[in-house]
Image: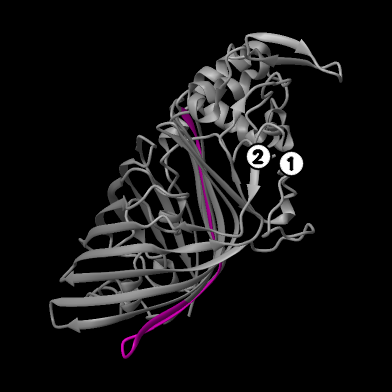
């Protein structure tokens, strides 16, 4: 069902869950996230030296509130997801998730959907920390071991691609009708064009991989006022799916490498990298790294990191699509917003697209620079700002910078709340919000966060996101 998707959609942007999914943080992360939570954010923060947590100093009239320092941290199944769209309203995006109107679009609904998706689309990402563990000390620094699942994608159509998808043979490009030998009504064009001519400016990009990482951070210098930290992460990657397709300035580029578990058909095309069967096995592997530095002066910290530097070599089920003429369409278009389910209606399981096999392909990771500044005003308040800048436009890339600022408020020793305001990442303006609960003297933490609460009160440009962790253990 991915055959069309791998050839015909556009956006230089993806989404940002991998830059946000850490429990207990709202508007900023780069200069404050520590232990395994700083992996993929800023590994220098592993060098932070654990200290006793003093929430309230003692006075002659009452005892203070202090928690012991904790060197170890663990988690399982912590992470987040994000889905946002500049094409759909909030109700439309919810329908995409719940599929309440799946398969029920009328002719008018399809025309409206094609109009809504013209030069617009949907973006999503999932970042799951399957396992995370870290140890930090004041003598030799901190180390973290992590296993993460990462998935990001974008479906974005130009005007003609949107009409083809949702209107099918009723798209005015098909100016004539005929009946084939099966008795099906088929639309065809008397002036057919190539995909590269019809879908200019259209792109689809999706990537799914698992990473096994080791990170190390160290305090490089310290005196009474100034501390300097440095760190690095190295990760081994297993790739399960890559779709990278773009039509730009009259040129079509489309490649696909997907685990055999998904049962993708490429018509009659053969490939030397073909993997038989239906097992969920990787179809590529590679390496990535992060580098970071953090400078702290008194209660103010500045963090700088470059993350996801690396690539994946795809050597299983690798195919590339040729630029061919589009003609002959029997489908009447998508009947719902479930693009995954609806795509086979216009792909013809390989019949509309000319695929050829390849031995391997290389994809660069979505490299980003992160900069963050924060100030600890008191035990109750911390203020900060973060900025994330994409360095490329490959599958999974951010597309445009994200800038957010805000505050963390700790009204109780066991509760931290965060919020702020931000913009970018093709989301418009957003308001993040977070809450983290620290129980049993800080031994057990749980939290929840959302990238945007504006979505609860507005209709357009919805951002549905959720970050959750219920088993963050600190010892």
Q: Secondary structure at mark 1?
A: loop
Question: Which badge, 2 or 1, is on the more N-terminal residue?
Answer: 2
Label ID, residue 267: 1
Label ID, residue 121: none
Q: Would you call the spot at circle 1 few (<14 residues within 10 Å), some (14-19), or many (20 or more)?
A: some
Q: Would you call the spot at circle 2 few (<14 residues within 10 Å), some (14-19), or many (20 or more)?
A: many
> Where residue 31 sits in the image (x, y, percent)?
28, 64
> Where residue 85 sits in the image (x, y, percent)?
48, 33
- Give above or below for 330 relative to 241: above
Distance, label 2 to label 1, CA atoms, is: 9 Å
- Give above or below for 421 relative to 409: above
For the point 68% across and 59% down, which residue is it?
272
Q: Decide if residue 51 is in sight here.
A: no
**Residue closest to the eye, 195 or 472:** 195
Left or right of 231, for residue 456: right
Q: Is residue 135 magenta?
A: yes
Q: Decide if residue 173 is in sight here.
A: yes
Q: Residue furthest top?
A: 176
Q: Nearer the viewer, mark 2 or mark 1?
A: 1
- Give above or below for 338 relative to 404: above
Q: Residue furthest right?
A: 182
> Where residue 1 sits in the image (x, y, percent)?
70, 39
The residues colored magenta run: 120-144
* In contact (CB < 8 Å): disc 2 and disc 1: yes
Q: Which residue is mark 2?
A: 3
Q: Is residue 79 magenta?
A: no
Q: Secondary structure at mark 2?
A: loop
Q: How many marks?
A: 2
For the point 42% across and 45% down, which residue is it?
451
């Amino acid at each position: 069902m991915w055959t069309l998707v791998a050839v015909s959609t556009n956006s230089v942007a993806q989404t940002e869950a991998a830059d946000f999914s850490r429990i207990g943080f709202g508007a900023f992360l780069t200069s404050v996230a520590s232990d395994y939570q700083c992996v993929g954010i800023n590994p220098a923060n592993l060098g932070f030296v654990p200290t006793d947590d003093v929430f309230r100093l003692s006075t002659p009239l009452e005892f203070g509130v202090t928690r012991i320092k904790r060197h170890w941290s663990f988690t399982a199944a912590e992470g987040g997801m994000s889905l946002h769209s500049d094409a759909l309203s909030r109700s439309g995006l919810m329908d995409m998730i719940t599929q309440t109107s799946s398969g029920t679009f009328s002719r008018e609904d399809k025309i409206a959907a094609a109009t809504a998706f013209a030069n617009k689309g949907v973006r999503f990402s999932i970042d799951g920390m399957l396992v995370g563990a870290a140890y930090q000390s004041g003598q030799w620094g901190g180390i973290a071991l992590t296993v993460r699942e990462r998935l990001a994608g974008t479906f974005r159509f130009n005007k003609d691609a949107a009409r083809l998808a949702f209107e099918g043979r009723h798209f005015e490009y098909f100016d004539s009708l005929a009946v084939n030998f099966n008795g099906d009504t088929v639309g065809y064009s008397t002036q057919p064009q190539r995909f590269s001519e019809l879908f200019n400016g259209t792109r689809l990009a999706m990537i799914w991989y698992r990473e096994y990482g080791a990170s190390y951070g160290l305090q490089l210098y310290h005196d009474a006022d100034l501390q300097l930290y440095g760190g690095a992460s190295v990760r081994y990657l297993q790739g399960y799916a890559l779709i990278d397709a773009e039509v730009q300035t009259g040129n079509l580029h489309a490649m696909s490498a997907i685990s055999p578990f998904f049962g993708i058909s490429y018509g009659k095309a053969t490939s030397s990298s073909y993997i038989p069967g239906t097992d969920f096995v990787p179809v590529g592997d590679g390496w990535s790294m992060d580098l970071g530095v953090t400078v702290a002066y008194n209660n103010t910290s500045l963090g700088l990191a470059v993350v996801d530097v690396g690539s994946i070599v795809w050597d299983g089920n690798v195919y590339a699509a040729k630029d061919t003429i589009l003609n002959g369409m029997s489908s009447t278009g998508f009947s719902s917003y479930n693009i995954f389910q609806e795509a086979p209606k216009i792909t013809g399981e390989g019949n509309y697209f000319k695929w050829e096999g390849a031995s391997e392909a290389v994809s660069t990771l979505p490299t980003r620079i992160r900069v963050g500044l924060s100030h600890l005003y008191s035990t109750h308040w911390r203020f900060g700002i973060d900025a994330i800048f994409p360095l490329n436009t490959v599958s999974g890339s951010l597309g445009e910078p994200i800038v957010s600022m805000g505050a963390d408020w700790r009204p109780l020793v066991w509760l931290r709340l965060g919020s702020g305001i931000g913009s970018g990442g093709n989301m418009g303006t957003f308001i993040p919000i977070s809450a983290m609960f620290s129980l049993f003297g800080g031994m057990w933490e749980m939290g929840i966060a959302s990238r945007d609460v504006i979505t609860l009160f507005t209709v357009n440009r919805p951002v549905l996101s959720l970050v959750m962790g219920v088993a963050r253990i600190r010892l």
